[in-house]
Image (cartoon, rainbow, N blue to C red):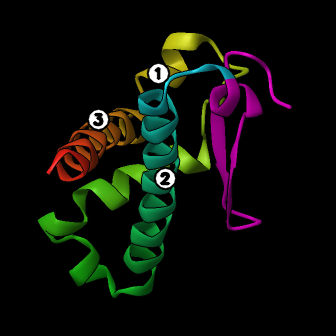
Amino acid sequence: ELEPSNFGYYSETEHRIVLNSDILNNKTSREALETLCHEMYHCYQHRLVDLYLDVDEETSALMIFRSPRMYYREFAAYAGKDSEYLDYYMQYCEEDARKYAEMAANGYEWKIGE
């Protein structure tokens, strides 16, 4: 059981996604799907950071590592859901996860409709 405003989270230390039972029992399937996709994207972001930290300095300066570099900085000083809402909501990693979740959920819905 999580706070009602917390639909789920990704735990990097445990390598697992936790979903609030409320979202599975009382929200739409679309909301549950978007939450799962959002948290899956956080897992992906952490894997990108791992890759960023594993390359040499010259390689890590490449434009391809722009997002992982920003994720790394944000994860180091992450404004969690207990922080001010806008501090949490406006983080680059959260914006990216929201965008991905919407796009992925649209894709899954389209595939299901086919």
Is residue 54 something one can see in this rendering? yes
Q: Which numbered disc flags the more N-terminal residue, 3 or 2?
A: 2
Residue 84 percent location from the top left of the image:
62, 12
What residue does disc 3 label?
A: 102
Q: Which numbered disc flags the more N-terminal residue, 1 or 3?
A: 1
Which quadrant of the view contains residue 12? Answer: bottom right
What residue does disc 1 label?
A: 89
**Residue at x 19%, y 53% (from the top left corner):** 111
Residue type highlighted by circle 1: Tyr
Is residue 7 something one can see in this rendering? no
Element under label 3?
Answer: helix
Real-space CA distance between mark 3 and mark 2, rounded to the nearest whole angstrom: 14 Å
Magenta region: 1-25
In the rendered view, would you say 34 is above or below 56? above
What residue does disc 2 label?
A: 42
Residue 73 percent location from the top left of the image:
47, 49
In front: 50, or 96? 96
